[in-house]
Image (spheres, rainbow, N blue to C red):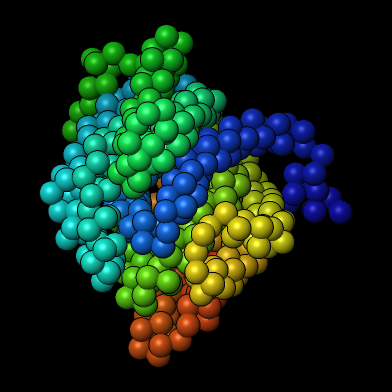
Amino acid sequence: MQAIKRLTGWGDRAFFKLMIALAVPIMLQQALSSVLYLLDNVMVGQLGDVPIAAVGVGNQLTFLLQIFSFGISSGAGIFAAQYWGKRDLANIRRIEGLTLVLSVVVGVAFTCVGLFAGEFFSGIYSHDDAVIALSADYLKIAAWGYLFQTLSLCLGTILFSCESPVLPMLSTLAGVVTNGVLNYVLIFGKLGLPALGVEGAAIATVIASVVNLVVLLVVSYVKKNPIAAKPKEMRFDAAMVKGFFKVALPVFFNEALWSVGVSLQSVLYGQLGTPVQTAMQILSTVDRIGFILMAGLGKACGVMVGNAIGEGKPEQAKLYSQRMRVIAPLAVFCLGLVLFALTPVFLMLYDVSAEVHAMALSVIRVYCLASWLSTLNFTIVIGTLRAGGDTLRASLIDLGGLWLISLPIAWICGKALGLPITLVYPLMFIGDALKAVAGTLYTRRNKWIKELK
């Protein structure tokens, strides 16, 4: 009984108080981000199959941007968490300066792709000329918000790592409210404005991205929180760049290769036809709901583990990791059961064909029952190994499951054998299962704690 209490944290009020204080704002911030995504999907969903698919294809570029930005911001978060454990504000702000420069480079690069190569990019994911043309129009507008998005992610991650998750949540709320109002006005042509459809959704998203960053910066400098740095405080030297890339490069390449792998799955969906692509786009909305809880608990684990290591308490870091590897998957599994029951109600929001409806119902229910595996992997890779500084091992485990198992299964079964997506999608979770086994075995060896200098 004592072992169960220790493993679950039962009765440890300090542990649960810290976990909730970190996880709830992160979950609310993720929930707001998902609302932003859901607003686009549902409102555009009223326009028909082609607009839904077009926005889904266009958002693949946004997805890639977020993954690259996540690689950079994760590196910042790893260092910031351990520095915050030591209350080393000077180095936190130097890391901030370095990662902001990298974020600008990534944001500008993706903006150029959206502006000048949107049609080519969209053609990778769809063979439908109508979808490609509409998606390219969407990207020419949406791309203007990419720089604001990547900067917001970087600054928000540093604040999370410094146990200040409330402001990113509030700035995201400001962006979501802006996006929701403008979506309604611009997509459907309200308040005397013309109905812009997909282009209206893109404009709303850009403006919302600007609002998010402005709120984040203004409040930070008024309140003088950890990211409110003067330019001279953000100067970094060669030694910091070297140390950062030693830790962050495995994360960056992990996210880059992972995003390419997931994008190849999306390419496959496009080649299997617009109905499949539309069904998987609807699934992505539900996936974001599950990600709210997964990310909240997983990122909270990372902050708790990183801060404990920075404070010189490795045994506490190990205990936090063990507990979160039980709590997070269990919580997401319970959420999955609720979503499983509500799936038919959720699908009533979409005006799609009977074929798309049937496919979406099937894949969503598979996701609901299997998403706890993804949560366990997230907690191991993001919340434990990366937070502990063992980014190389985290990358090997993460990429191995995707590239060696899930991706080959998807292409062989979907493209070569021609199996329906309702069979292909469940088989892809084999990769998650094997990754969870490998990750669990490695974390139990407790060789992942590496104090960063």
Which residue occupies 47% across, 26% down? 174
Q: Residue at x 36, y 66 (%)?
A: 266
Residue 53 appears at what percent x and percent y? Answer: 37, 61
User: Residue at the location (41% across, 82% down)?
Assistant: 414
Residue lying at the far top of the rendered structure: 222
Q: Is residue 3 left or right of residue 414?
A: right
| Percent x, y of residue 80 | 42, 31
Q: Residue 196 appears in which quarter of the rendering?
A: top left
Residue 149 in sight in this render: no
Residue 411, position as x, y percentages in the image: 37, 80
Is residue 18 at least partly visible in the picture? yes
- 296 vs 412: above or below: above
Residue positioned most to the right: 1
Above or below, 414 relative to 241: below
- Residue positioned 40% across, 90% down in the render: 417
Could you tell me how many numbered marks the image carries? 0
State the image quarter where residue 154 is shown: top left
Whole-percent x, y for residue 293 in the image: 60, 47
Q: Quadrant of residue 9?
A: top right
Q: Left or right of 114: which side holds 267?
A: right
